[in-house]
Amino acid sequence: MPQVVVEHLSKVFKIADSQFTAVNDANLNVEKGDFISIVGHSGSGKSTLLSILGGVLNPTSGNLYIDGQDVYSMNANGLAEYRASKIGFVFQFSSLVPVLTAKENLLLPTIFSPRQHDGKEKRALEYLDLVGLGDKVNSRPFQLSGGQRRRVAIARAIMNQPELLLADEPTGDLDEDTEAEVMQFFEKINKEMGITFILVTHVLGLAEKAKKKFRMHGGKLSEIS
Ligand SMILES: Nc1ncnc2c1ncn2[C@@H]1O[C@H](COP(=O)(O)OP(=O)(O)OP(=O)(O)O)[C@@H](O)[C@H]1O
Ligand SMILES: [Mg+2]
């Protein structure tokens, strides 16, 4: 069985007395270790789909199975544990805690993880170094540039050694060189740590690097050959 199975997944938002279908009958199988990209116009439903995959947004209908487990049949505690133990999420918009330093932001998710984390301090420093922020360990978000904050968020997403990394426009405010470095970092953790990767991006050059490519259009997900 694939690691991720998405079956007839839809999300309908209700606004006043009208409704809007943001994700329309999406189907997707992801094998462990896959590297998948999703492209699509603004408003096509990419972030909505990613949020459902990450266990943070209930679908209106359809099913999501991760490692054979029916994610949205779990109660709130089960869902929280699912997120903490299996998922790394790089959100589209900055999500760092402003009062914490870069290193403290990395350590935050480990507090909620049910797993034991030996050497997490060392790992936090190592990951910050990997994203080129070895000298910003004790900086707080307001002391960092937009691209640096994004890199902290990327390093944080792998702190719990997730099985599935979901990244929503992770290179959004990075220059081309930094974007290339971050992409190399993603390929490295995909290969070396075996982390399955789903990348939403509007940068076609990045999407091209994925092993499997998908497009979203008006809530419909389709594979690009
Ligand atoms: N909470 C919400 N309530 C109502 N409508 C929503 C909500 N969240 C998203 N939508 C709508 O669903 C559609 C898809 O939004 P989504 O954020 O998934 O798009 P996207 O593909 O990620 O776009 P972008 O590339 O701009 O980030 C949009 O039309 C948006 O207005
Ligand atoms: Mg989005």
Image (cartoon, rainbow, N blue to C red):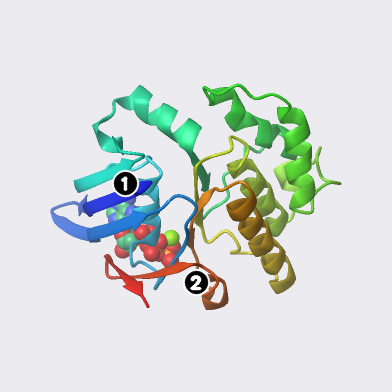
Horizontal relation, residue 193 to residue 87: left or right = right
Would residue 179 be visible to someone looking at this image? Answer: yes
Horizontal relation, residue 167 to residue 45: left or right = right
Residue 29: quadrant of the picture: bottom left
- Check disc 2 and report the residue beneath it: 202
Q: Which mark is residue 223?
A: none
Above or below, 141 against 211 in this view is above
Q: Which mark is residue 1?
A: 1
Estimate the x, y position of residue 67 in percent, counting from the top left.
Answer: 36, 39
Please tell me which residue is depicted at 13% across the width and 53% down the height of the picture.
17
- Residue type at mark 1 is Met
Mark 2, Cα crowd under 10 Å, few <14 / some 14-19 / many 20+, is: some
- Residue type at mark 2 is His
Residue reaching furthest left?
Answer: 17
| Whole-number angstrom distance, CA of label 2 to CA of label 1 | 30 Å
Quadrant where the C terminus is found in the figure: bottom left
Disc 2 C-beta below 8 A from ligand 1: yes
